[in-house]
Amino acid sequence: MESTPVRIEELLAHASWVRSLAARLVRDQATAEDVTQEVWASALSSPPRERSNLRGWLSAAVRSTVHSMQRGEQRRRNREEIAHVAREQAGPAELFERGQLHRELVEQVLALEEPLRSIVLAHWFEGSSVAEAGRRLGLSERVARLRLDAAHEILRQGLDRKHGGRESWSLAFLEWTRSKAATAGSRDAGVRDVAAG
């Protein structure tokens, strides 16, 4: 005789127990909440087949989710450490090249005409999101994004002309930002947007 699938309501009856188990395993309320949400997402997409031990199934799902998140966090820390070591070990020639790249990008941005310059400065150099930068400048997010995209294209074309094509400068910009990726903010994301376009 076939059993009917376990309904989500049956699993949600154990919601406080799941939240409590997650909190005990990760000892951080925000992460515990993330774990709990992942468990419910998993339960919705692939519910257990048997009702006989729902708490056992949920316990395994919580532990698996915690383990997966911890592995992801450890990988992120490893990447940050590698990037930090790479920055610390940069030689004088590489530091000089990075300085030149940074100066060149700043000069290109400052040479933009308004209203493009303001959106780039607000987004890259002050770290505002596109929506925040747009609000500050009295623009909708859509218009702000269009202006930022237009500015990126102008910057790419200027760098293309100066360096004889995209290949000769984009790799240098991407390598520069790759070493900064672990601590990257909007400024570095902006550099990658220009180089990757």
Image: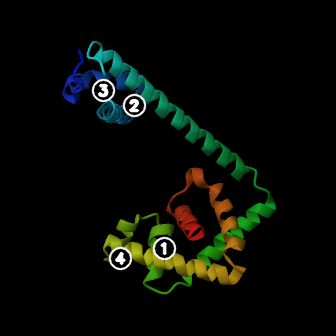
In the rendered image, residue 26, in percent from the top left (x then y), is placed at: 42, 27
CA gap between label 3 and label 2 equals 11 Å
CA gap between label 4 and label 1 equals 16 Å
Residue located 38% across and 22% down the image: 24
Give the amino acid at mark 3.
Answer: Arg
Please give the residue where the numbered disc 3 appears in the rendered image. Answer: 19
Identify which residue, 14 or 46, lies in the foreground.
46
Give the residue furthest to the top.
52
Give the amino acid at mark 2.
Answer: Asp
Identify which residue, 191 or 52, lies in the foreground.
52
Give the residue furthest to the front.
1
Q: Is residue 34 visible?
A: yes
CA gap between label 1 and label 2 equals 36 Å
Please give the residue where the numbered disc 1 appears in the rendered image. Answer: 121
Please give the residue where the numbered disc 4 appears in the rendered image. Answer: 143
Give the amino acid at mark 1.
Answer: Leu
Confirm or deny contact between disc 3 and disc 2 (CB under 8 A): no
